[in-house]
Amino acid sequence: MPASTPPRPLCRDCDGFPVVTITTGDRHRDGTRVTVPVTCRTCQGSGHTTPVSVVRVGR
């Protein structure tokens, strides 16, 4: 049986939903809403965080 990798922790700021679409309240001429995609700044759209023990600092 192959070894499984441990699951990566979810981002605490976006809770695993890194990209969302927000309506602005305006409408296009055809009646659809104007939306803006927003990406999580903490995880930069990945939905996961890197454990502190894995981060390498310096040389």
Image: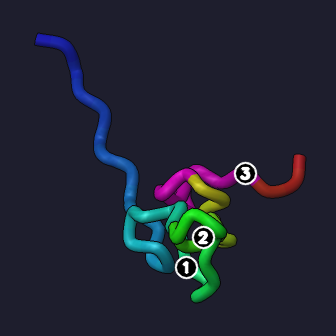
Q: Nearer the viewer, residue 23 or 15?
A: 23
Comes first in the chain, label 3 or label 2: 2
Q: CA distance from mark 1 to mark 2?
A: 4 Å
Label 2 CA crowd tier, 10 Å (few <14, some 14–19, many 20+): some
Q: Residue at x 65, y 54 (%)?
A: 55
Q: CA distance from mark 3 to mark 2?
A: 38 Å
Question: For the residue labelled by badge 3, is the local secondary structure a helix, a strand or a loop?
Answer: loop
- Which numbered circle lies on residue 23? 1
Amino acid type assigned to the residue bearing label 3 in the image: Arg
Q: Report which quarter residue 23 is drawn in.
A: bottom right
In contact (CB < 8 Å): disc 1 and disc 2: yes
For this orientation, the residue located farthest to the front is 29
- Which numbered circle lies on residue 35? 2
For this orientation, the residue located farthest to the right is 59
Q: Residue at x 57, y 63 (%)?
A: 30
Question: In this picture, which residue range is highlighted in magenta?
Answer: 46-56
Evaluate whether residue 51 shows in this view. Answer: no
Mark nearer the viewer, 3 or 1: 1
List the residue tagged with mark 3: 56
The image shows residue 1 at horizontal and vertical percentages of 10, 11
Q: Nearer the viewer, residue 55 or 11?
A: 11
Amino acid type assigned to the residue bearing label 1 in the image: Thr
In contact (CB < 8 Å): disc 3 and disc 1: no
The image shows residue 56 at horizontal and vertical percentages of 72, 51
Principal secondary structure, stretch drawn in magenta: loop
